Image: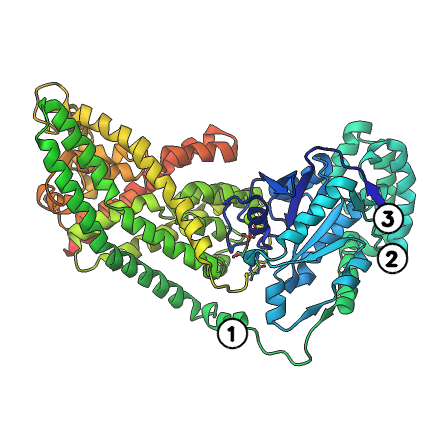
């Protein structure tokens, strides 16, 4: 076994594994940080770095995106592979789910063929043990020629062993395995033809020539492009490849790449036979039993809806008393502000800041409860099922792809949802999903619903909330369908969705999830929302001398001017119009604006709105629908620009969502008016 001398100080350790293998959990164990851990395939899309210390030594740890293989099909695979090729890590810790070795070893093999300095972290050994299965670690090490460390990352077991190995390798350099898979006579012959040509080209300095030859025979675009760059479109390597490909196609038709993949799976099957022991009789796993019901062809949908409905009921009921407490506190604070002189300052603090900010902060309980509920659904693995159920329904409409995983993240916030679209390799599917993700109702919109449902639908809050989320999903699906038939025509990529096993969520993980999502809400309250509230107060007080937030103020004038545009939606009240404009900054600002306009230290905003707006439930519903669907907030638009690379799509998403919102809210109001 060759040994690779350590090149950096501190050494660089890359974590690589399939999605949902426990990479982030291990990363957190090693570095003591609090990265997002999700029971989702495809949550880590960017690489993250941290530092690991052990017995006085340091190492820098890089958490790469989860990938199933190292072909160069999707953006996250390219990130991962390029880091291993060009970032030159000193060790690659390949984290593998011991309870589904067949699938995970595919990536391991590719790493070994590359000649990367691999150490295997064999994770989920607690699951393997609970199934009463056994893995022969010694034999696995022997056959692969690498170190294997059994562990259970979520229980922090095995972390020390990994640290010890990282430490030892930090001193001596890692062993570079040279695994050879036999690809059969024909492919091997072509490998032998290609290797000498590659060696002459000079690209093999870092990678083994054999690996490059195999990649070329797999028609890997990245590697081919590298050769085209150094030796042009018909240099010796490209020409040799063309000849080899022609010969292989002669034998196998266009299945040559499949022959290569099959050889790997064959190797894995043989390996597993040698090292994996199962009891003779195996009961159906609990996960399978639960899934027979939860992802059942017919029952799956109603169960999904029932769960969502119960969740919203719970969010409402449990947050009521907490909200009352916060409201009481701001009432008291507002009372204090009323005594402040000069009067303008009292008004800024009482009307503006306390009225506006208080109106938003009151919704901390439902927002956090909602995030806790979402975190529980995610961590148990149910959300992935929900995505699976939705995906199946979308498939019936000719839509496909892994769109629903990013979309479900959108229940928290559109930004991570849009970033997660990086895991979608088909560009058409990716763009479609980016554009429809904002229709999934994010946490920032919740205060609006809770406020208006509480004021106008006191008996049916849960149902109203439920209907809004569902309408968001339905609109997203319909618009996706329209886009795929018009703007982005073409084949959808095939994707087999992987369902993680059900797991009991840990308190720590629920806490991290809830906090990760909730903290943005709090920090926005202290920054963007506070600033917005002050601006609203100022515009409500100008020109100096008018009654605060009256129709004669700048706010009143602008709002009244634009109000007719919203007339057909039944929401043409000037203050509502102002709140919608302000809501572009962030959706909670809609509520903050209404608070700043209508509240001055006394009472519940809901009650004030019910009496001031002169609305019935239908108007309120049309308003909530408009808020659900209209323009994504500034931050989301910026991310759309970042992810698509052009302002064109950012601007498009701003404009078309307003159109969709207007049409649907108008339809609901107009049709509803016929009956009510
Ligand atoms: P990543 O996608 O590879 O980053 O995986 P995560 O670190 O986000 O973990 C995915 C899920 O697996 C989470 O729900 C973890 O709590 C869980 N998990 C991680 N390691 C283990 C383990 O050793 N045993 C069990 N039972 N669950 C684990
Ligand atoms: Mg992760």
Question: Could one spot residue 220 in this view of the protein?
Answer: no
Tell me which label, 2 or 3, sits earlier in the chain. 3
Disc 2: which residue:
184
Q: Secondary structure at mark 2?
A: loop
Q: Position of residue 676 (x, y in %)?
A: 14, 55
Q: Secondary structure at mark 3?
A: loop
Task: Decide if residue 651 is on the left or right side of residue 173.
Answer: left
Q: Position of residue 381 (x, y in %)?
A: 49, 60
Foreground disc of the pair 2, 3: 3
Q: Position of residue 251 (x, y in %)?
A: 86, 55
Disc 1: which residue:
289
Q: Residue at x 86, y 48 (%)?
A: 1
Task: Decide if residue 133 is on the left or right side of residue 542.
Answer: right
Dots 1, 3 in contact, CB < 8 A: no
Q: Viewer-proximal residue, 134 or 394?
A: 134
Dots 1, 2 in contact, CB < 8 A: no
Question: Mark 3 CB in 8 Å range of ligand 1?
Answer: no
Which residue appears farthest toward the bottom when viewing the image? Answer: 281
Foreground disc of the pair 1, 3: 3
Disc 3: which residue:
1
Task: Decide if residue 33 is on the left or right side of residue 600.
Answer: right
């Amino acid at each position: 076994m060759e040994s690779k001398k350590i090149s950096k100080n501190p050494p660089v350790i890359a974590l690589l594994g399939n999605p949902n293998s426990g990479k982030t959990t291990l990363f957190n164990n090693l570095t003591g940080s609090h990265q997002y851990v999700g029971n989702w395939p495809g949550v880590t899309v960017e690489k993250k770095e941290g530092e690991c210390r052990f017995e006085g030594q340091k190492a820098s740890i890089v958490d790469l995106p989860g990938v199933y293989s190292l072909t160069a099909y999707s953006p996250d695979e390219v990130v991962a592979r390029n880091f291993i090729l060009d970032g030159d890590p000193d060790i690659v810790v390949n984290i593998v789910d011991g309870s589904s070795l067949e699938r995970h070893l595919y990536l391991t093999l590719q790493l070994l063929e590359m000649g990367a300095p691999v150490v295997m972290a064999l994770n989920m050994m607690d699951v393997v043990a609970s199934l009463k299965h056994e893995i022969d670690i010694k034999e696995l090490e022997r056959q692969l020629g690498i170190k294997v460390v059994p562990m259970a990352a979520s229980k922090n077991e095995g972390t020390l062993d990994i640290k010890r190995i990282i430490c030892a390798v930090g001193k001596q350099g890692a062993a570079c395995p040279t695994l050879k898979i036999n690809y059969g006579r024909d492919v091997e012959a072509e490998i032998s033809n290609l290797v000498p040509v590659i060696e002459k080209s000079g690209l093999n300095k870092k990678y083994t020539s054999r690996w490059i030859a195999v990649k070329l025979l797999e028609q890997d675009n990245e590697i081919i492009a590298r050769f085209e760059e150094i030796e042009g479109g018909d240099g010796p390597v490209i020409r040799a490849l063309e000849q080899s490909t022609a010969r292989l196609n002669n034998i196998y038709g266009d299945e040559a790449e499949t022959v290569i993949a099959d050889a790997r799976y064959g190797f894995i099957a043989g390996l597993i036979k040698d090292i994996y022991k199962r009891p003779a009789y195996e009961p159906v796993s609990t996960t399978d039993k639960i899934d027979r019901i939860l992802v059942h062809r017919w029952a799956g949908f109603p169960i999904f809806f029932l769960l969502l409905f119960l969740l919203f009921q719970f969010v409402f009921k449990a947050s009521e008393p907490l909200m009352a407490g916060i409201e009481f506190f701001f009432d008291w604070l507002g009372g204090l502000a009323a005594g402040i002189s000069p009067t303008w300052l009292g008004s800024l603090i009482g009307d503006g800041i306390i009225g506006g900010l208080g109106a938003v902060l009151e919704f901390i309980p439902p927002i956090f409860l909602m995030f806790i509920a979402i975190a529980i659904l995610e961590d148990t693995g149910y959300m992935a099922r929900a995505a699976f159920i939705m995906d199946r329904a979308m498939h019936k409409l000719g839509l496909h792809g892994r769109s629903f995983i990013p979309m479900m993240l959108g229940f928290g916030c559109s930004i991570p949802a849009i970033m997660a679209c990086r895991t979608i390799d088909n560009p058409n599917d990716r763009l479609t999903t980016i554009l429809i993700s904002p229709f999934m109702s994010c946490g920032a919109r919740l205060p609006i619903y809770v406020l208006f449902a509480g004021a106008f639908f006191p008996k049916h809050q849960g149902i109203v909330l439920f209907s809004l989320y569902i309408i968001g999903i339905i609109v997203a699906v319909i618009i996706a369908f329209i886009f795929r038939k018009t703007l982005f025509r073409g084949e959808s990529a095939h994707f087999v969705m992987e369902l993680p096993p059900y797991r009991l969520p840990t308190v720590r993980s629920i806490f991290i999830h809830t906090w990760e999502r909730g903290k943005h809400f709090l920090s926005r309250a202290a920054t963007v929302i506070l600033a917005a509230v002050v601006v609203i107060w100022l515009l409500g007080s100008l020109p100096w001398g008018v009654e605060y937030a009256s129709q004669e103020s700048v706010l009143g004038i602008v709002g009244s001017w634009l109000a007719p545009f919203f007339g057909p939606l039944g929401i043409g009240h000037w203050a509502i119009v102002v709140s919608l404009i302000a809501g572009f900054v962030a959706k909670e600002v809609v509520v903050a604006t209404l608070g700043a306009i209508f509240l001055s230290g006394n009472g519940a905003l809901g009650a004030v709105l019910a009496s001031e707006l002169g609305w019935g439930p239908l108007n309120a519903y049309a308003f909530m629908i408009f808020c659900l669907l209209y323009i994504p907030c500034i931050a989301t638009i910026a991310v759309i620009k970042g992810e698509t690379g052009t302002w064109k799509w950012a601007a498009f998403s701003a404009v078309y969502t307003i159109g969709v919102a207007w049409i649907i809210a108008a339809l609901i109001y107009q049709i509803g008016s016929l009956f009510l």
